[in-house]
Structure formats: structure tokens, C-alpha cells
């Protein structure tokens, strides 16, 4: 039985197909320009504020990875999508409070925003009942500014230093350290931000060679992120349109 909230209008399906074609072409061109294999880059459709029907339509168009950044919205949407018989790979990409860990691990396949040892431990405990370990990315603070999330790459702080966070994930049997995530800081040119991230990622992989995922880049800067090694790009408006234009 299909959930009525996941019904897709034909005109909306056409809009999504057009946006998807454009984004896929941008990714392919960026990979070619960077001398990279297109298969190395995964597009995550960021569907925050968009209805579950868009997720169902995107899945029918071949999109397998979907991102959300608020548990309050994502949990219900994931349930609606599942009721429609669709099973995308869910990525939680927003800042996460420890008291939401138990809810997030019920639907998320990957959490991109692990930025403290305390959060890593909360996720590890919450994931105890999962059939397989939860993939987790350590979020990097590129500029070190407090309040925007991200572990500090040049800090040994016991809770917020990048290496302590990575170690807490790697040591948990219910988690799998998959790699790093970052957002270009406000006021930074993407080129500068992703060049810095690439340096951090290179050093990180020397210590954690299996953690090769690099989640970086959004609608406006995905080409630059791919040039600097992004394996996952998080695309919202370029794919789904501006939320205010949806009927």
C-alpha cells in the first residue's frame, strides 16, 4: 500500500528529472576536468523541507542516496518513504544532539556530522541493536570557529579534537569510521576551504587508511569540492529547486 503523502505529480517528476540531469552533467564534467572517475563521486539529494513524494520520485529516477539535517523532519519522512516501498540510503548531515542519537540510528545509514567524542559514544550506544555498524564521518571544522560544528584538526582536546573523535568512532564495534565531512566556512572562498580540507584529509588517511570518504560541496561549489577530492557532494536547490517555488 502506497502512502498518499508520497504521491508524485507528473509535473513535479518532470522538474526533478530535469534538475537531476543538470546536476549529473555538472558532476560528470567536474570529474572529467579533475581527471577523476565519475564512479568515485556519490550525489546525495538533500531533501530537507521537501516532501516525501520528492524522495519517491528521485528514487524512481535512480537516486539512491538522500540527505536530511533535522531528525524531527527526517524520522517521519523516512517512515513515509518506507511505507511507499522505497528504500534509499539515508544520510544524516546536520548537527546532531546526543539525545537524538537513538532516533537517528533507526533510519540513517550514514551520519556525516560526528564532531565530539561524547556524540560518538552516544551513537555507538544507540546503534547497539543495528544489524550492521553505522557508518560515521567525522565532521571537520576548517576554520576552528566555535558554534558551527566540527572537530578541530589541530587539537588534542579530549572531546572535540579530530583525532580523539576519530578514535572514538574507530574503537566502537557498532560504528564504522568512513571518512570526513566539512562545510565551507562563512566568508571563505570554496577554493581556500576545500584546499585546506584536502590537506586535513590526506593527513587523516595516513592514520586511518580505510576512512576514504570525503563529504564536501553543495549546489554552488560542487565542482571545486570534486577538484579537491570530494567523494560525496550534498545537493539540494540545484536538484530540487527553491522551496518557495514549489506548489
Image: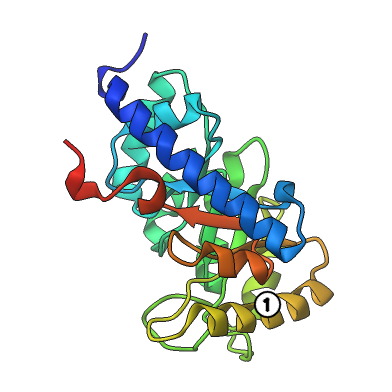
Side of 78 where 6 appears, left or right: left
Q: In this view, does 83 lie to the left or right of 107?
A: left
Above or below for 197 versus 109: below
Quadrant of the frame with the N terminus: top left
Count numbered badges in the picture.
1
Query: Residue 87: x, y in percent?
Result: 52, 27
Label 1 sits on residue: 198
Say above or below: 233 vs 221.
Answer: above
State the image coordinates of residue 116 (x, y, percent, origin top left). Answer: 53, 73
- Tell me the colour scheme of the image: rainbow
Viewer-proximal residue among 41 and 84: 41
| Residue 11 placement: quadrant | top left
- Under circle 1, the secondary element is helix
Does residue 192 appear in this view?
Answer: yes
* Number of other residues with Cα within 10 Å of mark 1, as a class: few under 14, some 14 to 19, many 20 or more: some
In the image, 245 versus 141, the foreground residue is 245
Q: Where is residue 126 in the image (x, y as percent from the top left)?
A: 52, 50
Looking at the picture, how far across and down is residue 141, in whole percent? Answer: 52, 80
Q: In this view, does 56 lie above or below 29?
A: above
Q: In this view, does 8 lie above or below 160?
A: above
Q: Nearer the viewer, residue 34 or 88?
A: 34
Q: Which residue is drawn at 34% across and 53% down?
A: 70
One can see residue 231 in this view: no
- Asked which quadrant contains residue 62, the reply is top right
Q: Which residue, as the protein is rendered here, is positioned at the far top?
A: 1
Residue 99 quadrant: bottom left
Q: Residue at left 50%, top 48%? A: 23
x 46%, y 57%: residue: 93
- The answer to whether residue 189 is left or right of residue 225 is left
Q: In which quarter of the image is the C terminus?
A: top left
Give me the residue at 69% from left, 63% from top: 33
Amino acid at each position: 500500500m502506497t502512502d498518499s503523502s508520497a504521491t508524485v505529480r507528473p509535473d513535479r517528476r518532470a522538474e526533478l528529472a530535469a534538475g537531476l540531469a543538470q546536476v549529473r552533467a555538472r558532476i560528470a564534467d567536474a570529474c572529467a576536468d579533475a581527471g577523476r572517475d565519475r564512479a568515485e563521486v556519490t550525489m546525495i539529494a538533500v531533501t530537507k523541507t521537501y516532501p516525501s513524494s520528492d524522495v519517491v520520485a528521485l528514487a524512481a529516477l535512480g537516486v539512491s542516496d538522500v540527505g536530511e539535517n533535522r531528525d524531527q523532519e527526517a524520522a517521519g519522512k523516512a517512515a513515509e518513504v518506507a511505507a511507499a516501498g522505497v528504500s534509499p540510503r539515508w544520510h544524516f548531515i546536520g548537527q546532531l544532539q546526543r539525545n537524538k542519537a537513538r532516533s537517528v540510528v533507526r533510519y540513517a545509514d550514514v551520519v556525516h556530522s560526528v564532531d565530539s567524542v561524547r556524540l560518538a559514544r552516544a551513537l555507538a550506544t544507540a546503534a547497539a541493536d543495528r544489524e550492521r555498524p553505522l557508518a560515521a564521518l567525522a565532521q571537520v571544522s576548517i576554520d576552528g570557529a566555535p558554534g558551527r560544528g566540527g572537530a578541530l584538526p589541530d587539537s588534542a582536546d579530549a572531546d572535540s579534537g579530530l583525532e580523539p573523535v576519530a578514535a572514538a568512532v574507530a574503537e566502537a564495534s557498532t560504528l564504522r569510521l568512513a571518512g570526513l565531512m566539512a562545510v565551507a566556512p562563512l566568508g571563505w572562498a570554496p577554493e581556500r576551504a576545500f584546499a585546506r580540507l584536502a590537506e586535513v584529509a590526506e593527513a587523516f588517511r595516513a592514520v586511518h587508511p580505510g576512512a576514504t570518504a570525503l563529504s564536501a560541496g553543495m549546489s554552488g561549489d560542487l565542482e571545486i569540492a570534486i577538484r579537491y577530492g570530494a567523494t560525496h557532494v550534498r545537493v539540494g536547490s540545484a536538484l530540487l529547486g527553491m522551496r518557495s517555488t514549489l506548489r
